[in-house]
Amino acid sequence: MTDNSQIPPLLLARASGLLLSGRVRFPKNRLGEIVREDEEFKIFRQVILDPTGEQPGSPGAIFKVCFHFARFSAKTNKTLSLTPIPFILAQSGFRSKTWLLGQETRLFQGLYEWNTVRDAENYWTSFPMKLMKKRAVPSSLIYSISEFLNQNQPGEILLQGETVIL
């Protein structure tokens, strides 16, 4: 049986509705900010989908993916990473995505907030992830899903004992 929720024209229609509703924001206040993990990552884009009254007050999960693109420069891939945004916005339970680039290794990283762990798990097999998997060096692709435990301070969350800056 086909998953109708991942048909590209339907995803584009849903994303168009979200954009027209005014719920989609591309804040600029975090651009250029450095996030320190194994190396320094620089935030180069962020998108936030404002929640509705039916959604939980806080996200329930974080999906983190890291990879190297198989082709093109980091600069070109930063531009090409605009293409899947409508397909990402249209995913069930999506809350936000922060794009980062490793300053030493040029490793791309995506941090996504989801309503639930189930939503985050479903994203791994979604249409936009299939697009990304085709463009990534397979051996470089790693991801993790963490349950959201609580809000520490604005922009920080506690995930199973580790603090992550979003």
Image (cartoon, helix red, strand yellow):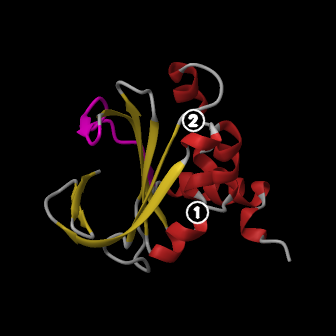
In this picture, residue 138 sits left or right of residue 121: right
Task: Name the N-terminal-most of marks 1 and 2.
Answer: 2
Q: Quadrant of the N terminus?
A: bottom right
- In the figure, 55 relative to 141: above or below? below
In this picture, residue 122 sits left or right of residue 43: right
Evaluate if marks 1 and 2 touch, with contact meaning CB atoms under 8 Å apart: no
Residue 34 magenta-highlighted: yes
Residue at (29%, 51%) from the top-left corner? 166
Kindly identify which residue carries mark 1. 123
The magenta-colored residue range is 24-38
The secondary structure type at the circle numbered 1 is helix
- In the figure, 53 relative to 92: above or below? below
Among the 4 quarters of the image, the one containing residue 31 = top left
Q: Amino acid at mark 2?
A: Ser
In this picture, residue 14 sits left or right of residue 59: right
- The residue closer to the viewer here, 139 or 86, is 139
Residue at (27%, 38%) from the top-left corner? 30
- The residue closer to the viewer here, 74 or 25, is 74
- In the figure, 94 relative to 45: above or below? below
Residue 102 seen in render: yes
Kindly identify which residue carries mark 2. 81
Residue 92, image x and y in percent? 57, 69
Residue at (76%, 54%) from the top-left corner? 8
- The residue closer to the viewer here, 125 or 127, is 125
Residue 20 seen in render: no
- In the figure, 116 relative to 105: above or below? below
Structural distance between the alpha carbons of marks 1 and 2: 17 Å
In this picture, residue 58 sits left or right of residue 63: left
Q: Amino acid at mark 1?
A: Tyr
Residue 159, image x and y in percent? 28, 66
Residue 64, image x and y in percent? 43, 54
The secondary structure type at the circle numbered 2 is loop
